[in-house]
Image (cartoon, rainbow, N blue to C red):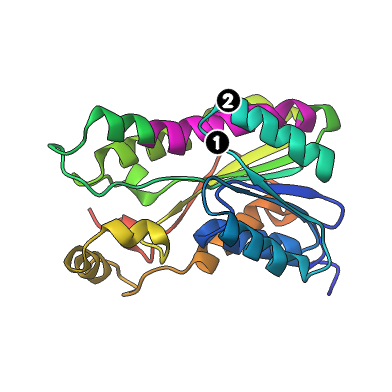
Amino acid sequence: MSQSEQEFAGRVALVTGGSRGIGRACVLQLAEAGADVAINYVSREDAARETAEAAGKFGVRTHVVQADVSSADDVHHMVEEVTSSLGPVDLLVNNAGVFDYVSHEETTPEIWHRAIETNLTSAYLVTWAVKDGMMERGYGRIVNIASIAALRPRPMSIAYAVSKAGVVALTQSTSEALAPHGVRINCVAPGLTETEILDGVDQAALDRLIAETPLGRIGQPEDISELVMFLLSDRSRFMTGQTLVASGGRVLIP
């Protein structure tokens, strides 16, 4: 590999929800760039271990860690385990999330709380679990995964849109607080992307969403992970608190 491809050699990365979809794509690209990677999962250990095996082929260390990242206790134990196994976390991708495609009548308190806790509270908890160490070392890179729903919400995903808007606000506020300590925090807002999160959306709705997308296709996990890598890397060294949109142009439509 070239020097640029090995940019993260010696760094430790943690990807929440890292077993599948966008998280898995991030894990593999981080490993290819030389980072030792911790793969967090909540229920699919088989997928997490398969992802770790694929990442290990790049010659890096990997660690699979089960945790519900909406739980403060789980997050505390997860970060302790990763630090013990691989070392302090230098690179964090807050990717874990849930999506409910439901009407306002179906948006129950349970759906609301699950969206807020899994999509937003988790990003806060994991960031807070690693930020002090990053500040002490004077180095940290965090990328939060939001959604274009945070920027152009729709009536069939109210709780999801609110939670992801919170992720954007968390990115902006925390990035300004931590910037003087050498910690950069940015955000990616994907549009429609080919992941299991779309399983709950009926085909007619998907077809309509694709038709609304100027580039005329669904995004792939690698379309998003490429932006994540850019924001983690020194190529974005003068960026913090920013949200990059990758939606095939769809966010531009009112």
**Looking at the figure, which quarter contains the N terminus?**
bottom right
User: What x and y, as percent, mark residue 249?
Assistant: 35, 64
Q: Is residue 170 magenta?
A: no
**Main secondary structure found in the magenta portion:** helix
Horizontal side, residue 9 vs residue 243: left or right? right
Q: Is residue 125 magenta?
A: yes
The vertical placement of 224 against 71, above or below, is below
* Amino acid under disc 2: Ala
| Residue 243 in view here | yes
Circle 2: element type:
helix
User: What x and y, as percent, mark residue 174?
Assistant: 58, 28
Horizontal side, residue 3 vs residue 44: left or right? right
Q: CA distance from mark 2 to mark 1?
A: 7 Å
Q: Which residue is mark 1?
A: 69
For residue 185, the mark is: none
Residue drawn 50% across the image and 61% down it? 21
Residue furthest left in the image: 105
Q: How many discs appear?
A: 2
User: What x and y, as percent, mark residue 137?
Assistant: 85, 32
Residue drawn 67% across the image and 45% down it? 65
Residue drawn 82% across the image and 50% down it? 11
The vertical placement of 111 against 226, above or below, is above
* Amino acid under disc 1: Val
For disc 2, the neighbor class at 10 Å (few under 14, some 14 to 19, many from 20) is some
The vertical placement of 205 against 40, above or below, is below
For disc 1, the neighbor class at 10 Å (few under 14, some 14 to 19, many from 20) is many
Q: Which residues are magenta?
A: 115-134
Q: Nearer the viewer, residue 32 or 191?
A: 32
Q: Which residue is mark 2?
A: 72
| Residue 88 in view here | no
Circle 1: element type:
loop
User: What x and y, as percent, mark residue 6?
Assistant: 82, 64
